[in-house]
Image: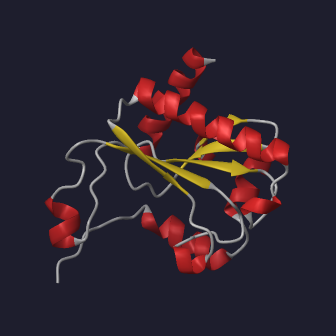
Amino acid sequence: MEHIWAPWRIEYVLQAEKGGCFLCEKPKEDNDEPNLILWRGKSNFIILNSFPYNPGHLMVVPYRHIGHLDGLTDEEAKEHFDLVKRSLRLLTEVIKPTGFNIGMNLGKVAGAGVDDHVHTHIVPRWQGDTNFMPVISNTKVLPEALAATYKRLKEGLRSLI
């Protein structure tokens, strides 16, 4: 068996063991850059996924801890979708993907890592972004560090406002 060293994964493992809701805790801290929070709205925020499927993988998240989409107020839902649109513009402008996967995993059985706090994933895609590594070795290669992606997106966000 071959092993690949991925020391950043320990954060995910420890976070899962700790319990609580990181989607509630991170915005309470005044630490946006280390927490990868790109934008704060009135009811929702945009955060870079710490364990991305692809570079630029963002999530739009309501501040309020709610597990069902139909529990969002009209104001929360409108801002949520507006931030999804803003995220698409940002990613298109800054990292220039040729497509996107946008979606929600509602419930554990649907694959939700956090099944009691609604959030929308926005995953940039490029032609050929799936190569032999995931197929042969069940390993995803990300070509850019999270901090570098955060910096590029944060700068790009300022130019779009």
**Quadrant of the image occupied by residue 130:** bottom left
The quadrant of the image that shows the C terminus is: top right
Q: How many marks?
A: 0
Q: How is the image coloured?
A: secondary structure
The quadrant of the image that shows the N terminus is: bottom left
Q: Nearer the viewer, residue 31 or 125?
A: 125
Identity of the residue drawn at 41% across and 44% down:
100
- Give how far across and how far down residue 145 sits, in percent: 38, 44
- Whether residue 67 is visible: yes
Q: Locate residue 114 relative to residue 103 in the image: left or right.
A: right
Residue 71 position (above or below residue 147) = below
Identity of the residue drawn at 82% across and 61% down:
71
**Quadrant of the image occupied by residue 110:** bottom right
- Give how far across and how far down residue 151 sits, in percent: 49, 31
Identity of the residue drawn at 51% across and 23% down:
156
- Judged from this view, the residue extending furthest toward the bottom is 1
- Give how far across and how far down residue 3 sits, in percent: 23, 75
